[in-house]
Amino acid sequence: MYLSIVIPCYNEEKRIPATLSKIEEYLSQQKYDYEILVIDDGSKDRTREIVLEMQKKIPTISLLRLEQNSGKGASVRAGMLAARGEYTLFLDADHSVSIDHLEQFLPYVSQGYDIVIGSIEVPGASVSEHAGPQRRFLGKIAKHITRTMLPLEIEDTQRGFKLFSCSAKDTLFPNQKIQGFGFDMEILFLAKKHGFRVKELPVQWNNAAGSSVTWRSYLEAFRDILEIRASQSNTGVRKEIPRFAFVGVLNTTVDFLILNLLIYFAGLPSSARFSFYKIISFLGASTNSFFWNKHFVFFKEKQNARTQ
């Protein structure tokens, strides 16, 4: 067996040395051949120089440099297209899911699965949180949006630890269009379309501090979801945008009504109670949003998925 490891990097001078050392230490103890492809996505720090220095000691490392920062999806795509392995794994530069998970992943490709992905949303997974609760909160919102808008039947699309057979890799990544963080969703959407078998396995995720994922990344991912639907759906998003806007207006109305009903029936609240009322009204509007988006805005693809 020949295995390729693809690692996308952007300004990772502080974390990439430890990641490469741990990966090489693990792979050097295995019985199969391998290559480690580091994709430098136009870093402005010393990522490139550090990787070249490590390459002198670890000849299995190769460096592919993108001259301009193009996004995680672009760097992963470049690495996957350059990979020569019978199987190819891409993982994050922060090593948030450790390479030794590979031992549990490889048996499933031998059982006929085309893609095996890491997940923190299936039984057996665990999370070590260092990046702050706000990222975890945004991540949960993003997962709910993804499940509503894309009929993937996958609990966690965004974990940076995915193993592909050569057939799946060569079919999917040449057709990848999205260059940002939403590329995982596009690849899994294409995998479903092509009938590839996907296995979701629990992983231990160390959510390290210093991640490049920000609130803007989640907004870009939402834009990517709309792009996926526009490119893959028969009707595109033209009919969905007015419905989505209508649900947005409805959410504001529900939020306003709940808040004012609470004030009316309970009397003018103190500041503490008013904050509590706002939380209740927000939860009511969020529930309303999830229900109507699922059954009114994005229901067609859900129905199609059940008939396939």
Image (tube, rainbow, N blue to C red):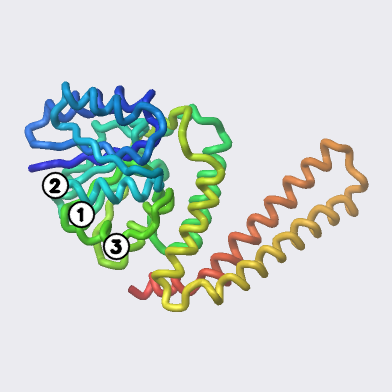
> Which mark lies nearer to you, 3 or 1?
3
Which sits earlier in the primary sequence, circle 1 or circle 2? 2
Q: Label 3 to label 1, Cα distance in Å?
A: 20 Å
The N terminus, quarter of image: top left
Q: Name the residue located 8 percent from the left edge and 36 percent from the top edge.
A: 32
Q: Name the residue located 23 percent from the left edge and 29 percent from the top edge.
A: 23
Write down the residue under mark 2.
84
Give the amino acid at mark 1: Tyr
Give the amino acid at mark 3: Asn
Q: Name the residue located 81 percent from the left edge and 53 percent from the top edge.
A: 259
136 above or below 112?
Answer: above
Q: Which numbered marker is on residue 113?
A: 1
Question: Does the rendering let one see residue 220?
Answer: yes
Task: Tell me residue 126's x, y (percent).
Answer: 40, 34
Q: Which of 195 and 261 is in front in this view?
A: 195
Give the amino acid at mark 2: Arg
- Figure label count: 3
Mark 2 lies on a secondary structure that is: loop
Task: Tell me residue 58's x, y (percent).
Answer: 16, 25
Which sits earlier in the primary sequence, circle 2 or circle 3? 2
Mark 1 lies on a secondary structure that is: loop
Q: Label 1 to label 2, Cα distance in Å?
A: 19 Å
Which sits earlier in the primary sequence, circle 3 or circle 1? 1
Write down the residue under mark 3.
175
Q: Which of 41 and 270 is in front in this view?
A: 41
Q: Name the residue located 18 percent from the left edge and 46 percent from the top edge.
A: 83
Characterize the local packing of mark 3: few (<14), some (14-19) or many (20 or more) Cα atoms within 10 angstroms: few
- 138 to the left or right of 278: left
